[in-house]
Image: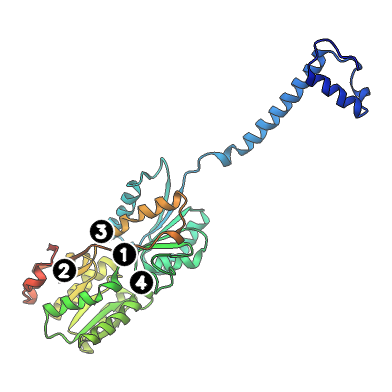
Amino acid sequence: MRHTPGTTAFERQVFANAAHAGLRGSYPRRPTRRALLTRLTHAALLAAGLGLTIACDRLPGQARRVPRVGYVANQALPGNQRQDAQNQAVIDGLADYGYIPGPNFQMESRFPTDDSQNAEMISGLLRSRVDVLVTGGTAATVTAKQATATVPIVGVYVGDPVGTGLVQSLARPGGNVTAIGNGNTEIMGKALELLLKLEPTLRRVAYLYNPANASHVTVMGQLSTLAAASGLEAVPAPTLAMADLDVAFDKAVANGAEAFMWSGFLQAQGDVRVAALASSRHLISMGLDRSYPVAGGLISYGPVALAIFRRAGYYVDRILKGAKPADLPVELPTTYELIVNQTTASALGITIPDEVAQQVTSWI
């Protein structure tokens, strides 16, 4: 075959392939270098155009997606300073890892005033396609797990994560849930010890709790076992709402309760009412959060709750960076606080023993 002077080896191969395929009629017998280059240029432009079209089609999917975090608060009753502080602690914890609402992540928060609202609010967040769900308290976390098996969940201030079925074990949670526990099941022995030091003749201790909360039921059972081992009797005082609180308290007193432990599930309103009921009956009482003595209760012993809520930022950061909840161990509190309301102690005629006073982290 004769070749046009100045053609390249590539061009000559193109001609040869065309001739071999019987396509001579589709090309000039002796195409000029300019004609060939023009065809090649058209093909290149067409390919580039197709590539640009594909790239443009992918741009929205390839653009950096701002992560979305859903947060369900732990019974956010109006005007509840305790709950406001917990909510702010979650925001501060996220900021510790560089997550500021707006610029680099979106946060959608829901504030149920009752556990019965959890399911609807969680479903709404899941429909909005959040990347991580942060849930305050045991009830909300259990509801979240029932609602999804795929969206990562970080439970905050959760009671008995294993016993409630939220995780398989503390070290290896499994599934799509991990958590920061509140340690309440671990402190019942210490709580009873403190009450006995305040009232050595104590024989019956009532526990005001929510029977619909799995972790509260676990604590009630544990308290009964520990009380029996100490020669005491634990008196159940179940209540579901503020309207039932007075009745539950009076019934426990009628059953011989000489002291009360308060789970705190009704938040600020419950704190104030239980403190008032205990004082009116001249009974010692203990809450599991510092909000109780702040509201007028005698004493509280429990973990530093705000530190637990702030720790949620660590888990969210790990998950957004690719970690799976199944591989993130559940953490339990390492720091506890003992708070005493001196005014209430004085009104009850109680002198705080030295061995208890030495453990007090804050006096009110």
User: Based on the displayed image, in which of its 4 quarters is residue 18 positioned?
Assistant: top right
CA distance for labels 3 and 1: 24 Å
Q: Is residue 45 left or right of residue 323?
A: right
SS label for mark 2: loop
Between 227 and 252, the residue placed more toward the observer is 227
Tell me the SS state at disc 1.
loop
Disc nearer the start of the sequence (4/1): 4
- Residue 78 x/y as whole percent: 31, 60
How far is mark 3 from mark 2, CA to CA? 15 Å
Q: Dot 4: within a 10 Å radius of its alpha carbon, few (fewer than 14), some, or many (20 or more) residues?
A: many
* Mark 4: amino acid: Asp
Q: Amino acid at mark 2?
A: Gly
Q: Which mark is residue 81?
A: 3
Q: Which residue is at a point 42% across and 42% down the rendered structure image?
A: 104
| Distance Cα–Cα, label 4 vs label 2 | 28 Å
Mark 4 or mark 2, which has the lower sequence index?
Answer: 4
Disc 3, SS: helix
> Which residue is painted at 25% across and 72% down in the image?
187
Which numbered disc flags the more N-terminal residue, 4 or 3? 3
Among the two numbered marks 3 and 1 on one chain, the one whose residue lies closer to the N terminus: 3
Residue highlighted by disc 4: 160
Mark sitting earlier along the chain (2/1):
2
Measure how far apart labels 2 and 1 are at the Cα level. 28 Å
> Residue 275 sits in which quadrant?
bottom left
In the image, residue 37 sits, relative to residue 224, either above or below, namely above
